[in-house]
Image: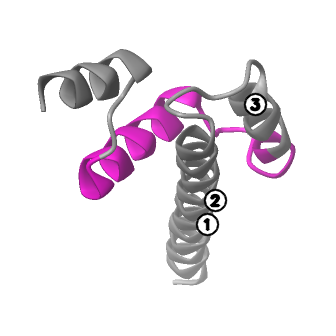
Amino acid sequence: MKKAKAVKSKKKVANLNKQFMLSAAKCIAELIVTEKVKQNGRVPWGYASKLLSEGRKTFPGMSRRTINNYVILLEKERKIGRTILRVVVIIFLA
């Protein structure tokens, strides 16, 4: 019985750690999107890599793909254009 409880508690801790990692990835994605809005659709070179390396210090399993998925999700929610060209075309056609 004691072994079963130990395994169950390890799974709970692993799930909790994953949830913390995903919330950190979402915060990083929000920083990237706000910087992208400030810079007219472009993120400064190395900005995302710097944030990712800071996140990996705490959560080694954090990946760029996860952050990119959150960035895409936030852009769809906020209806932000992905590049400068898309915004210019919309303004030009209006």
Say few, some or many: other residues with alpha carbon within 10 Å of mark 1 (under 14 / 14 to 19 / 20 or more): few
Per the model, the C-alpha gap separating discs 1 and 2 is 6 Å
| Nearer-N-terminus badge (3/2) | 2
Q: How many marks?
A: 3
- Residue 80 in picture, x, y percent from top left: 33, 43
Say few, some or many: other residues with alpha carbon within 10 Å of mark 2 (under 14 / 14 to 19 / 20 or more): some
Q: Is residue 48 shown above or below 18?
A: above
Q: Quadrant of residue 52?
A: top right
Q: Is residue 42 shown above or below 77?
A: above
Kindly report which numbered mark, 3 or 2, lies closer to the viewer in this rendering.
3
Q: Which residue is mark 3?
A: 47
Secondary structure at badge 2 equals helix
Instruction: Give the magenta part as a residue range.
Output: 55-79
- The circle on residue 24 is 2
Q: Which residue is mark 1?
A: 20
Kindly report which numbered mark, 1 or 3, lies closer to the viewer in this rendering.
3
The three-letter amino acid code for the residue at tag 2 is: Ala
Q: Quadrant of residue 3?
A: bottom right
Q: State yes or no: discs 1 and 2 in contact (Cβ < 8 Å).
A: yes
